[in-house]
Image: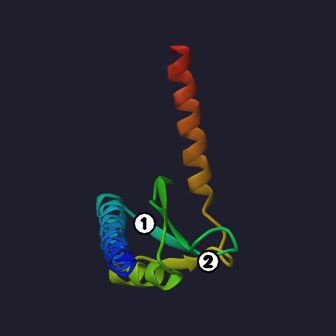
Amino acid sequence: MGWFRRKKKQAEAARDSKEIADALFQHLSAFVTTRRGVEAWVEQPTSFNKPSILLVAADGESTRRGLPSAEYGYEFADAHHIPCYDAGVVPYPKRMREYGLKAKQEARRAADGR
């Protein structure tokens, strides 16, 4: 009886991972298609983090998501015809940090009521 239960759990896990991959692809595609000048940085896996992709738009807005593999990130960038860099070699753009600082300052002003 335990054998059938194990197979059912494996099938559920496979289905869930497919749904996650679809949701991941949809999120990343939406970011690329709704923003201008998007570039990608693929972050290689470490001992405690899985591979991920960082997408940065021309204004500095960004999104980061975990990936099934680093190859998935390179293939995604190639399919969407956007520049792709290895995060361990090419540094993140300054505009991304500036965008984050500006967003924090605006949030602080809104909280202060200015």
Q: Residue 86's image quarter? A: bottom right
Q: Position of residue 62 (x, y in %)?
A: 48, 56
For disc 2, the marked residue is 44
Q: Is residue 19 or residue 31 the one in the foreground?
A: 19
Secondary structure of the residue carrying numbered label 1: loop
Q: Residues within 10 Å of mark 1 (few under 14, many from 20)?
A: many
Task: Answer with mark 1 or mark 2, whichever residue precedes in sequence.
Answer: 1
Q: Nearer the viewer, residue 102 or 44?
A: 44
Q: Is residue 110 above or below residue 97?
A: above
For the residue pair 111 and 52, the one nearer the viewer reads as: 52
Rendered position, 2 above or below 26: below
Res. 50 image quadrant: bottom right
Q: Amino acid at mark 1?
A: Val
Q: Nearer the viewer, mark 1 or mark 2?
A: 2
* Amino acid type of the residue tagged 2 in the rendering: Gln
Which residue does the image show at 47% across and 57% down from the upper left?
A: 63
Residue placed at 50% from the left, 22% from the top?
A: 110
Q: Toward which corner of the image does residue 48 lie, by quadrant? A: bottom right
- Residue 103 % position (x, y): 53, 38
Q: Which mark is residue 56?
A: none
In the image, taking residue 71 as reference, residue 6 lies left or right, namely left
Secondary element under disc 2, as helix, strand or loop, is loop
Coordinates of residue 8 in the picture (x, y in percent): 31, 75
Gap between marks 1 and 2 measured at Cα: 20 Å
Residue that numbered label 1 is attached to: 38
The crowding category of the residue bearing disc 2, from other C-alpha atoms within 10 Å (few below 14, some 14 to 19, many at least 20), is some
Task: Give residue 14's position: percent from left, percent from top.
Answer: 35, 76
Q: Is residue 10 left or right of residue 42?
A: left
